[in-house]
Amino acid sequence: MLARDWYYTERRRVGIDSAVASIYDRHDDSDSRARAALTMLGLQRGWRLADIGCGNGVLACEAAAMGAEVDAIDISPAMLALADILARDRKVAIRTQFAGLLSFAYQPNSYDLIVSEFALHHLPDFWKAVALARIFGALKPGSNFYLRDIVFAGMPDGIERDVEGWADFSIKNHDFDRDSVITHMRDEYSTFGWVIERMLTDVGFTLVSADYHAPLHGTYLLRKPKSGEQG
């Protein structure tokens, strides 16, 4: 897509400097969780995979170790540096790309699998839909998109209860402090699960599954229909 003077600037997003990047490798089970997700998604040797918002590259490197051709994409140079270091340490090949959901380069119908985890909420809803349409265009027909993000599973009239519940859960289970929760609510763009689901299906995806398994976390498995199939 050609850049326009009205186009959203992805560098506005919060948390892309080296200080934030340094905390992303503190969860010891990230390798096994990435491997389990890729196994569940049926990753096959030789597939082309894009990890958009790749962070420190754990999932990208696991996919490369399983035989995939991987594009590790992130808007943060600090994160991409971590991904490159991890790839060298594990002796796997990944291609890093300094870009985001609205700017990653792709050929239409070229990926066998696209994964994006906890990146979409950095975009306002209008631009979320634009980003999802780009992902749809990048996938081969019949291929899957795996999305995880911070979303509100409830309705607007329960927002105070839901946010306070998420704050308590995050502080107790993920070593976050309350200031981090406040920053997310004030400065980032998490939306409702039913809004995300509508966006996903409106751009053409078939919603295979939606799982709201933890406070304000949503996991979605989407499929791009083949020609002639109904979404």
Image (cartoon, rainbow, N blue to C red):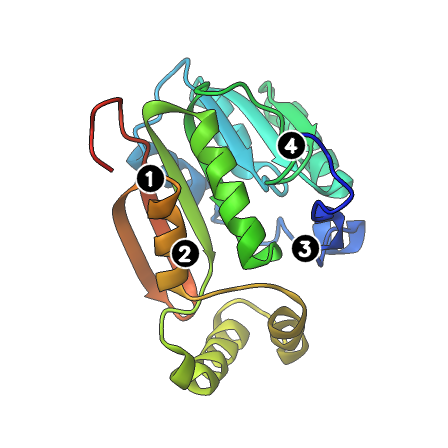
Do labels 3 and 2 touch, CB within 8 Å?
Answer: no
Up the image or down, 206 lies above or below 105; here it is below
Where in the figure is residue 124, as x and y percent of width and height?
59, 58
In this image, 169 relative to 27: left or right?
left
Secondary structure beneath disc 3? loop
Q: Residue at x 60, y 73 (%)?
A: 185
Up the image or down, 143 lies above or below 116; here it is above
Q: Residue at x 57, y 25 (%)?
A: 71
Per the image, the residue denoted by label 4 is 86
Per the image, the residue denoted by label 3 is 23
Which mark identifies residue 196? 2
- Sort mark 1 into few (<14), some (14-19) or many (20+) by Cα contacts within 10 Å: many
Disc nearer the start of the sequence (4/1): 4
Q: Quadrant of the C terminus?
A: top left
Disc 2 marks a residue whose amino acid type is Ile
What distance separates the C-alpha of mark 2 from that of mark 4?
32 Å
Q: Which quadrant holds residue 207?
A: top left
Q: Of residues 121 and 129, which is closer to you in this image?
A: 129
Which mark identifies residue 189? none
Per the image, the residue denoted by label 1 is 205
